[in-house]
Amino acid sequence: MNLLYSGKVRDIYDAGDDRLLMVTSDRISAFDVVLDQPIPHKGRVLTALTEFWLGQMADIVPNHLVSVDGASMLVRKAEMLPIECIVRGFLSGSAWKEYTEKGTVHGMPLPAGLRQSEQLPDPIFTPSTKAAIGDHDENISFDQAVALVGAEVAAEAGAISLRVYERAAARAAAAGIIIADTKFELGWIDGKLALCDEVLTPDSSRFWEASAWEPGTTPASFDKQPVRDWLESTGWDKTPPAPALPPEVVEATSERYVAAYERLTGLPFFPDGGDRSPAAVAG
């Protein structure tokens, strides 16, 4: 197969017949630098979680998935929207920074007096641009999204994203996990908006341990937080190459990814995926 794209974590190949093969590796990046040490099972977890969530959301929105094999997904090609579809249920990250400076999030006024990590009155749709390779996405207002995709498409994308987030957030809450925010990719397949790419994983979402959440603080993310914490402790200047990760940090990070899968799905994790029935995945 022809390699179309190789990113920090994922490689995409042309599989012919209007198909793509998306391979999610065990590579891990931190502070925009890819580390030398892979995280065991990370690629499989991201793929398996995406497969699970696509099944859970099939009655809300179609998707691009054809089949899954290990850490690889065979998917249909889609005409992707030129925006990232972000939903925020809690005030954190770049949204918190904008709020402290302007009292807004993606240009939308929010009530005064909110604290960092506080739950918003209602989840909000906050799109961003899709940056070129090496650049960062830019937060935009809904009106700016309309200028990019049109009013009808922007409204539909927002409605789909909010419905998917709300269902996922409810399931996660039952497992003691908060989905503070998440990013979706939508594209056109057969004339309908479809859910594509990675869905509701620790790499595309901000997962928090519900028992550790407290407004006014920054809960640890349920993903590669051990990697970030260890790198910060070394005094590394965040330019390549990164320091080699100790084995215990690699192991702790792998365990967090696997734990996220098992708690969110209620299923045991099998690295090869062979023991999971389609019925179990579909819920």
Image (tube, helix red, strand yellow):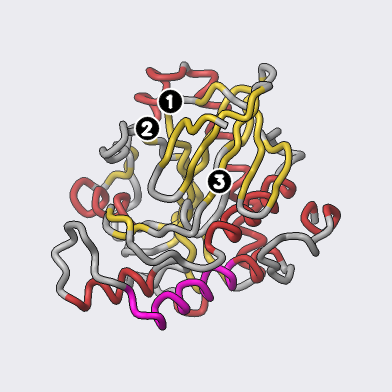
Residue 33 relative to residue 252: left or right: left
Q: Quadrant of residue 58?
A: top right
- In the rendered image, residue 94 lying in the magenta stretch gets the answer no
- Label 3 vs label 2: CA separation? 21 Å
For disc 3, the marked residue is 23
Q: Earlier in the sequence, mark 2 or mark 1?
A: 1
Which stretch appears magenta? 245-260
Where residue 279 sits: x, y (%)?
86, 55
Question: On the image, numbered disc 2 is attached to which residue?
Answer: 130
- In this view, the residue in front, 37 or 277, is 37
Q: Quadrant of residue 83?
A: top left
The amino acid at mark 1 is Pro
Pointer 1: residues within 10 angstroms few (<14), some, or many (20+)?
some
* Quarter of the picture holding the N terminus: top right
**Label 3 secondary element:** strand
Cβ atoms under marks 2 and 1 closer than 8 Å: yes
User: Residue sitting at 73 percent across and 49 percent down?
Assistant: 56
Nearest-to-viewer mark from 1 and 3:
3
Residue type highlighted by circle 3? Val
